Image (tube, rainbow, N blue to C red):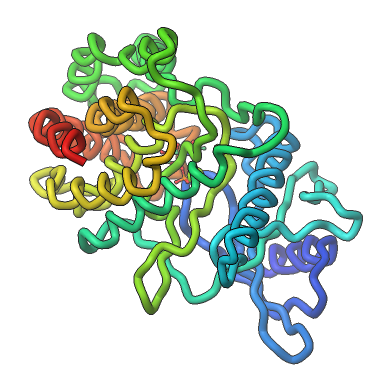
Amino acid sequence: MPLYREHHLQEISKQFQIYGQILHAETCKIGHINETYTATYDQGGVLVRYIHQKVNQTVFRDPVAVMDNVMRVTTHLQRKLLEQGARQSTRRALTIVPTRDGKSFYCDGNGEFWRTFVFVERVQSFESVQNATQAYEAGKAFGQFQSLLADLPGERLHETIPDFHNTRKRFQALEQAIEADHCNRARFAAREIDFALGQERWINTLLDAHAADHVPERITHNDTKFNNVMLDWESGRAMCVVDLDTVMPGLVLYDFGDMVRTTTSPTLEDEKDLAKVQMQMPMFEALARGYVEAAKDFLTPAEKGYLAFAGKLITFTIGIRFLADYLTGDRYFRVHRPDHNLDRCRTQFKLVQSIAEQEPAMQGFVDGL
Ligand code: GN1
Ligand code: MG
């Protein structure tokens, strides 16, 4: 990390209720949106770590609302875990470290929003799934997360990114990006554009089901990527889920769909060898078992009936977001190489096809659970 940043971070760290001296901090490269640092402190002679994170305000336009949600959610999770007698509750749900004046975030002189979390030790996340046990653990972790939040008291959570998983709106944004073709890139993505536009007939399915009251709104995570599940080093069991910025009202199907997208193919999100990108039934079965076990208390038959479809829908939705971002000049997702968003889009579309081929078998399995 450049020195000036380290200096800046020292200033930031002083704002939070941390006792001890900051020794060093490293950038954490996971995630396409926020800036995250792992900082080590000397606290009474013991090394203790914290996460400092700068909120991306281009993506999260109302960081106060984001932090209001995150605070309510983390407080509730901790309370429920303690009620249940869970051990190591601060490894099982994130804990916000407040500022010295008791706020959940610090706004620095540049108008940047910073927040601090207790670092969860002896856990790790993976960019792709190694085995079916991990898929099971991911399903269970997000199912439990939704279940613990089902009785969150108080008002409806803020919609921090309106229409986040609204496939129709995402589709319209893609159409506009194609039409404008600001960067002259549409010619390099002709096949992907064709594919995307050809899927229109089924993109309203969940929007319609929700409008007709077949599937209810709940409190959902909305970014249930496999790398947002922290697994215990020793046991391999899921300890906690992270990345709570998009926790807001939503459909559980969107959460499950993103789990399917990120746990059922053994590949990375930007795998270039498309032959390797495949929905693998054993992974799906483990994922669905874990999820349905944890969600059985609230999941309705109607919701269950869309689980396989949701995998296809969310994979497609993220795919068109990558494609639109490629066409508009990589302004949303952080990229690490030329054409990165186009590669990510291709990977998603290959997975959509693989899911579509196996959708009846996938749903058949869920129906038997
Ligand atoms: C973004 O930054 P990260 O990886 O947690 C995005 C998700 C996408 C994901 C694709 C707020 O999440 O919606 O599914 O990239 N988050 C936001 O990898 O847009
Ligand atoms: Mg995220």
Toward the bottom, the furthest residue is 45
Q: Is residue 191 above or below residue 208?
A: below
Name the spot of residue 194 as percent of width and height, x first: 19, 16
Q: Is residue 41 left or right of residue 261?
A: right
Question: How many numbered marks does the figure carry?
Answer: 0
Q: Quadrant of residue 237?
A: bottom left
For the point 55% across and 28% down, the residue is 249
Q: Is residue 147 visible?
A: yes
Q: What is the quadrant of the N terminus in the image? A: bottom right
Question: Along the horizontal axis of the image, is 15 left or right of 164?
Answer: right
Position of residue 363 relative to residue 14, above or below, is above
Q: Residue at 60%, 38% (x, y): give it.
A: 151
Q: On the rendered structure, is 130 left or right of 105?
A: left
Of 261 and 108, the residue lying toward us: 261
- As rendered, which of 293 and 9 lies closer to the eye? 293
Residue drawn at point x = 46 percent, y = 56 percent: 30
Residue 312 in percent (x, y) is at 24, 29
Q: Position of residue 118 (x, y in %)?
A: 66, 66
Relative image position of residue 66 (x, y in whole percent): 67, 38
Up-down: is 144 above or below 162?
Answer: below
Q: Is residue 181 visible?
A: no
320 or 115: nearer the viewer: 115
Q: Classify the position of the C terminus by image quarter.
A: top left
Which quadrant of the structure image shows residue 317? top left
Which residue is located at x 34 percent, y 21 percent? Answer: 184
